[in-house]
Image (cartoon, rainbow, N blue to C red):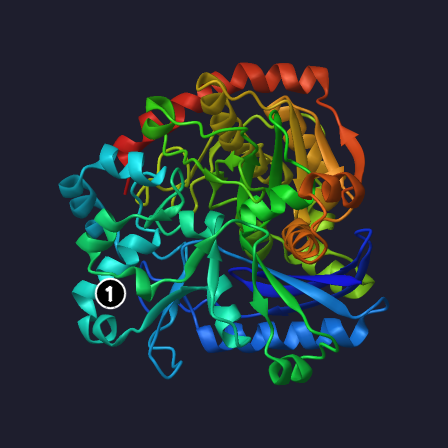
């Protein structure tokens, strides 16, 4: 039998098929545009996302070289939701993570409700990215849409609905709405009442790996499914990616290196407390029932490399077009091996953890007339890595020590980039054979739902690791000394924000 992971991201979706030993059998990808109708807004056209998901499933089924797909796990970006009416019409675009229009509401509402109380109920601290505050914005500014909404679907449950199921939502994705209690695994009625949202307007929350239903036969045939297909709850892409990377034991963590960067460790039990609360590090469900995780992230992440390429990477872009190469690899090949003489505060977007600051901007310190372009690029990448080291240091002070980083995503394919990160963070980084780890995690949960094989057993069979990059001792020493200065940057520069 074969199993499909459908991964619905912020910039595109992909369908990946694996056989019952975790070998990749088919892959399809579609990109879609982020809509920016006004400053502070970021949306996806839900119909375009749905149609793109249908297209990649159809294409992956058409090119599958193994047995027909028998199970599907849908993983998706967190927070984004779509209001849907009783006829199944989408009433508005989905507001995605980068959308900060609810910034003022997040501040005033959480103050009134109680920030610590909110954290104790949801495991998360207030931020405009979460579905709760986007819903409150909709209620205040588009009451017509809010009142017409029959359901509010995140992308996992929305796609289940599109496939003819009575939708359910996995615990990890429900946790990212900030309407869900991950400690008792239920919608938090005290928050729903304040927001004027009913449980009936939300999908049924279930443990990851739970059978949600089967794809409608007629719909499945149009998508190239030849057998009855079981749909399993898979949920938020970061915990699913941690599962697909094999980061399921305490001390291990997935390191997703892509458009954004994210570290997701594994906890045997919930980890909460003032240290995590102060630094906006959440606690919610892992993709394995009974385990928990957090999400330490930089929204700037790999965006900073794309920005550099777009602004100053014309030579590499033109050479890549001539020679059929990757412009990003050409840029990374050009950076020096030694630490730069610069220090970068990498806030080219809102900050992510630990600060949740949507106003601060980035900075590069130490520029001279002798500074080279390649040195600036290295400093930008160092800055993002310092930010991830900062998050790891906060987790360690809260009693969570990470000794193993398992790298996934596009950045995991670059040895030079991984070496830089290992040097800055001071931790070995191990690659995994399948870098599409969220899709692999979704397929793994689908296999569990169909065969009942324990997820831990699937991890040991399906996840295969690659080489490990170790910190260069001299570079690591320099970065350790420099890290103390990096920690001072944000407190100093936030006073000068403009």
Image coordinates of residue 341 in percent, x first then y, are 57, 25
Tell me the residue at 80%/55% (across/down). 20
Height in image: 370 above or below 245? above
Q: Is residue 414 visible?
A: no
Taking the image as shown, residue 116 lies to the left or right of residue 221, namely left
Image coordinates of residue 24 in percent, x first then y, are 80, 57
Closest to the observer, 13 or 170: 170
Q: Is residue 329 visible?
A: yes
- In the figure, residue 234 lies in which quadrant? bottom right
Image coordinates of residue 182 in percent, x first then y, are 40, 41
Q: Secondary structure at mark 1?
A: helix
Kindly identify which residue carries mark 1: 138
Q: Residue furthest right?
A: 65
- In the figure, residue 239 lies in which quadrant? top right
Taking the image as shown, residue 459 lies to the left or right of residue 257, namely right
Image coordinates of residue 248 in percent, x first then y, are 63, 35
Q: Residue furthest front?
A: 452
Height in image: 446 above or below 454? below
Closest to the observer, 96 or 301: 96
């Amino acid at each position: 039998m074969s199993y499909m992971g459908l991964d619905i991201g912020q910039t595109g979706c992909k369908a990946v098929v694996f056989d019952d030993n975790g070998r990749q059998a088919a892959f399809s990808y579609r990109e879609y545009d982020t809509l920016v109708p006004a400053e502070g807004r970021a949306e996806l056209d839900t119909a375009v996302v749905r149609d793109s998901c249908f297209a990649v499933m159809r294409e992956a089924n058409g090119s599958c070289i193994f047995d027909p797909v028998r199970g599907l796990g849908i993983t998706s970006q967190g927070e984004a939701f779509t209001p849907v009416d009783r006829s199944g019409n989408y009433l508005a675009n989905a507001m995605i993570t980068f959308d900060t229009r609810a910034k003022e509401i997040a501040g005033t509402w959480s103050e009134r409700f109680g920030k610590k109380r909110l954290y104790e109920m949801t495991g998360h601290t207030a931020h405009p990215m979460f579905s709760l505050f986007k819903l409150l914005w909709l209620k205040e500014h588009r009451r017509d849409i809010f009142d017409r909404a029959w359901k509010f679907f995140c992308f996992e449950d929305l796609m289940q609905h599109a496939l003819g199921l009575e939708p359910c939502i996995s615990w990890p994705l429900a946790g990212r709405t900030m309407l869900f209690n991950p400690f008792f695994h239920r919608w938090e009625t005290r928050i729903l009442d304040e927001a004027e949202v009913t449980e009936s307007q939300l999908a049924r929350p279930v443990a990851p790996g739970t059978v949600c239903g089967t794809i409608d036969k007629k719909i499945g045939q149009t998508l190239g499914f030849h057998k009855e297909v079981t749909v399993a709850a898979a949920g938020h892409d970061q915990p699913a990616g941690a599962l697909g990377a094999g980061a399921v034991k305490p001390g291990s963590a997935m390191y997703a290196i892509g458009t954004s960067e994210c570290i997701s460790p594994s906890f045997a039990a919930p980890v909460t407390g003032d240290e995590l609360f102060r630094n906006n590090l959440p606690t919610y469900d892992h993709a394995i029932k009974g385990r928990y995780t957090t999400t330490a992230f930089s929204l700037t992440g790999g965006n900073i490399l794309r920005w550099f390429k777009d602004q100053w990477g014309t030579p590499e872009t033109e050479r890549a077009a001539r020679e059929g190469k990757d412009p990003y690899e050409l840029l990374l090949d050009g950076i020096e091996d030694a630490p730069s003489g610069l220090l970068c505060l990498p806030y080219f977007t809102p900050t992510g953890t630990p600060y949740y600051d949507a106003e601060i901007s980035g900075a590069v310190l130490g520029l001279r007339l002798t500074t080279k372009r390649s040195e600036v690029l290295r400093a930008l990448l160092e800055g993002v890595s310092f930010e991830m080291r900062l998050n790891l240091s906060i987790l360690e002070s809260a009693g969570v020590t990470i000794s193993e980083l398992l790298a996934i995503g596009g950045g995991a394919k670059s040895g030079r980039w991984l070496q830089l990160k290992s040097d800055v963070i001071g931790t070995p980084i191990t690659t995994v054979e399948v870098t599409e780890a969220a899709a692999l995690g979704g397929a793994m949960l689908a296999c569990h739902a169909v065969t009942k094989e324990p997820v831990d057993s699937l991890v040991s069979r399906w996840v295969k690791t690659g080489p490990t990059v170790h910190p260069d001792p001299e570079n690591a020493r320099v970065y350790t000394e420099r890290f103390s200065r990096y920690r001072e940057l944000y407190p100093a520069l936030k006073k000068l924000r403009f």
